[in-house]
Amino acid sequence: MVCVTDAKHGGELNCDPTESLPTSTQLRAGMDTYDHRGEAVGTDAGRQAAYQLWPISEKMTEWQEIESLINRTLACETADLLGVKAHCFDIALSTTGDTNDYYQWWDTHNHNCIDFARNHQLWRLYCKAVAKRIERENDRIYRHATGNTSIDREEILARQRDIIGFGEAALATAPSNAGYIFHSLIGVYRSFGGKPAQRAIIDRWIAAASDPRELYEAYFWGFFNTEPDACWPYARHAVEIAEQMVHTAKPDDLHDAAMMLWHCHREVATKNWFNAQLPENMVQKSLRHFDKSITVITTYLADSEGYLSMLVGSYMERGDFCKQHHRYSAARRNYRTAVRLSEEYAQVMAGNALDEHESFNLIDAWLKIAYIDKHRNKPQLVAHTRYVADALINTLPIDEELLPFYRDKLEELSQWCDQHQYPAKRPRTRQPRRTKHRKTKR
C-alpha cells in the first residue's frame, strides 16, 4: 500500500479506516461527494487520501498546492479509481484564484470533469461542474462589462446566449440533479432576460424537481430571487416542504433537515431587512418566522456544535429587527436574552474563555442595550450598561481591529451620561432591604 504524506498541511494522507467516503457506485446512484453516509474507507490508500483531501486542502492558500495534493492522491493505490477521481475533481473545482494560470488550470479541470462525469453517468457531479462553469462565465462577463476592459453590449448578449445554450443542452443531457444547473441559470436570466424570464426558469425548475429536497431548493431560490410582491407563495411552499422533511427525516438526516428549516425561516424573516419601515402585517410575519427559527434551534439542534452561537445570533437578529421598527422594549428583551444565554454558557464552560465570535455577540448585545436605554433617556441604566461593556472589553478575547470602534462607542456613552449629570461609572450596589419584624402581642 502506498502511503502519501503531507507534513506541511496536516500529516499523512491516510486516515482512520472507519471514516466514510462515497464509492463510485454510491456516487452513480446520486450520493454527493463527501457524504457522511458513504462506505468506510478501510485500508484503501486512494480512498483514505481522497477523504483527507478536504480537510488538508482547506488549510492551503495556493491552487498549486492543491494541484500537487491531488496528483499525490491519484498516485495512491486504490480499488475504486473512479470514486477517487470524482472527489479529486470536486476539490479542484472548489478552489479559488485570480491569475490567468489559475483560470486556465481551472478551465481544464472543469472541461475534463464534465466529460468524465457524463461518460460515467455521475450526474450529480456532472450538474455541479456544469453549474460552476455557468457561474464562472457569467462572472467573467460581469467583470468585463464593469471593469476597465471595454466590451460591446452585443458581445455581452452573445456570450450570455452562449451560456444559456450550454446550460439548456446540459439540462437535456442530465436525467437527474438538474437543480444545480437551474440555480446557476437564474443568475444569468436575471441579467439577461429580466423578471419574466427569471420567473419562467424558476417555474421550470419546480416542475422538473424529482424529490422533496430539490423541490424545496426550487421554491426557496424562487422566493430568494423574486421581487417582494411576488415571492411569498414560493416562501410558503418552501416552509411547508422543509417542515415535512423534518417530520419524516431519519435520525441520521434530522440535523440537515432541521438546518434547512431554520435557514428557510431565517431568510423569510429577513427578506425585507433593509426596508426602512414595513407595514404592520409584514412586521408581524417577520417576527413569527424569527420565533419559528428559534423554536427549530431549541427543538432539533440543541445538541449540535455551534448551538449557542446560532441561538444568540437569532436573538440578536430579532432584536435588530425590532429596533429598526421602533419596538425598543422588544429589542431590549431580545438583547437581554442573548446576554443571559452567553453568560450561562460562560458559567457552564467553568472558566474557559469565550471565543472571539461569542465575545463579540456578548459585547455587542450590551452596547445595543445601552443605546436603547439612551434612546429612552435612562442615564442610570446607560451608565451601568456602559460599565459592564467596558469591563467585558478589557477581559474577553476580542478582535484587536474592533478596539477603536468599541472605545468610540464607550466614549460617546460616557459623554452622554455626563451631560445628564450621571457619571459613567459603576453604580453603587443596592443593599438588600432589611425586613422589619413586627412585635406580636403575647
Image: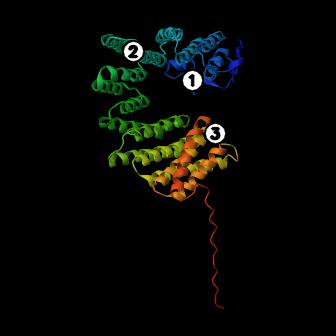
- The residue that mark 3 highlights is 355
Q: Earlier along the polypeptide chain: callout 3 or callout 2?
A: 2
Name the amino acid type tagged 3.
Answer: Asp
- Is 398 located above or below residue 204 in the figure? below
Name the amino acid type tagged 2.
Answer: Ile
Query: Residue 378, percent across and down?
Result: 49, 58
> Distance from label 1 to label 3 (Cα)?
29 Å
Query: Residue 100, percent across and down?
Result: 51, 9
At label 2, counting other C-alpha atoms closer than 10 Å, the crowd grade (few under 14, some 14-19, many 20 or more) is some
> Distance from label 2 to label 1 (Cα)?
32 Å
- The residue that mark 2 highlights is 141
At label 1, counting other C-alpha atoms closer than 10 Å, the crowd grade (few under 14, some 14-19, many 20 or more) is some
Q: Residue furthest left?
A: 196
Determine the residue positioned at 34% across, 23% down: 190
- The residue that mark 1 highlights is 34
- Count numbered badges in the picture: 3
Q: Earlier along the polypeptide chain: callout 1 or callout 3?
A: 1
In the rendered image, which quarter is residue 143 located in? top left
Quick one: quadrant of the C terminus?
bottom right
The residue nearer to you, when weighing 331 against 36, is 331
Determine the residue positioned at 52% across, 23% down: 32
> Distance from label 3 to label 2 (Cα)?
41 Å
